[in-house]
Image (cartoon, rainbow, N blue to C red):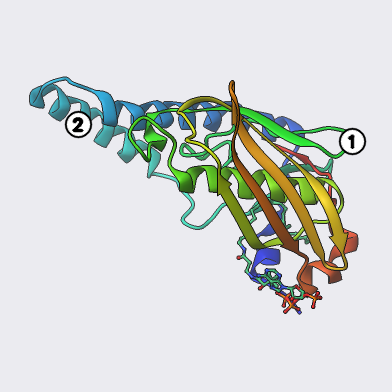
Amino acid sequence: MTDSILDLHINDGLTDEEIDHEKNTYGPLAEDVRELILLALQTRVDADDVARAREHLAAAREILERDRETGPYGTRYNDSGRYRTWGNAVMGLRNAIAPIGEIHEEPDGRVWADFRLNPAYEGPAGHTHGGVTALVLDQILGDAARAGGHPGMTGTLTVRYRRRTPLGALHAEARIDRVEGRKTFVKGHIADAEGVCVEAEGIFIAPQWMIEHRENLDTSPRRE
Ligand SMILES: CCCCC/C=C\C/C=C\C/C=C\C/C=C\CCCC(=O)SCCNC(=O)CCNC(=O)[C@H](O)C(C)(C)COP(=O)(O)OP(=O)(O)OC[C@H]1O[C@@H](n2cnc3c(N)ncnc32)[C@H](O)[C@@H]1OP(=O)(O)O
């Protein structure tokens, strides 16, 4: 059986130098757009200045649209084993809404990230949106399953909001709790400087198509 996820799992044959070049070209663009998202929320310049800024943005869009892809980014890799999930909503290098730069994997199976959520991720006044913390936890827990050699799709994600999550500096981490056949149970949390704000348990399930392609799947890819 084939699956549309596999269709977007592509060796695009780039050299490491070409990947580095793309990284250095498009990474800063996403950084600029991230800053623009915040500016759209926070600028207080007057209508004339907004109109002038929008003309510049229209000019930038016109340049960027000259050569573009139209579909999802998917997972791309090369012969030296560098994996790119640059469209990922949580940590994609080219995705301006992705709040996490890097997810670290420890030899003991713990997966963690330090990150900042700016006011574009607001839910309750001055605090992080609960859907955003769930988004981050889905990724971190899923990554712990993958890093532990048990990649899967999220079957169930249970989130317990213990206390409000502020905006600003946060820490997320997760580790595998147990594996039962195709199901991997993972636990994790998000904390601020005062301690845990949100806890989660996820059940990650390896579908049949993933098991069939298991031998082709590097579960600890050099992912960026
Ligand atoms: C070379 C190719 C390699 C390709 C690799 C590609 C990708 C790698 C995958 C992951 C990458 C890793 C890390 C990425 C990190 C994070 C990304 C975020 C993750 C997501 O954001 S992902 C999107 C949201 N996610 C979905 O979009 C899932 C949609 N859904 C399904 O794709 C199916 O629904 C599935 C697969 C979940 C189950 O389907 P299925 O047919 O395999 O399940 P089946 O019925 O056979 O049940 C088998 C056993 O699981 C139990 N069970 C069934 N469903 C359950 C559930 N929901 N909760 C709890 N338990 C459940 C049964 O009770 C039974 O348990 P028991 O064996 O004990 O009886």
At horizontal 72% and vertical 30% (from top left) the residue drawn is: 17
Q: Which residue is mark 2?
A: 55
Residue 130 % position (x, y)? 47, 45
Q: Disc 2 residue type? A: Glu
Q: Is residue 72 left or right of residue 7?
A: left
Q: In the rendering, at what x and y percent does residue 23 appear?
A: 61, 31
**Res. 16 visible in picture:** yes
Specify whether 188 is left or right of 45.
right
Where does residue 177 sit, x and y in percent of width and height? 82, 50
What x and y, as percent, mark residue 56?
A: 24, 28
Vertical placement of 208 versus 97: above or below? below
Name which of mark 2 and mark 1 comes first in the sequence.
Answer: 2
Q: Residues within 10 Å of mark 1 (few under 14, many from 20)?
A: few
Location of residue 101 by image quarter: top right
Of the residues shown, which amino acid type is indicated by label 1?
Answer: Asp
In which quadrant of this rendering is ligand 1 seen? bottom right
Question: Residue at (27%, 25%) from the top-left corner?
Answer: 42
In front of the other: 90 or 203: 203
Q: Nearer the viewer, residue 186 or 32?
A: 186
Question: Where on the picture, by quarter, is residue 213?
Answer: bottom right
Q: Looking at the image, which residue is at 32% across and 38% down?
A: 61
Q: Is residue 123 left or right of residue 154?
A: left
Identify the element where label 1 is drawn: loop
Residue 89 visible in the displayed image:
no
Q: Which residue is mark 1?
A: 108
- Residue 59 vs residue 85, the one in the foreground: 85
Marks 2/1: CA–CA distance: 52 Å
Q: Dot 2 lies on which element? A: helix
Which residue is located at x 19 percent, y 31 percent? 55
Q: Nearer the viewer, mark 2 or mark 1?
A: 1
Picture quarter with the C terminus: top right
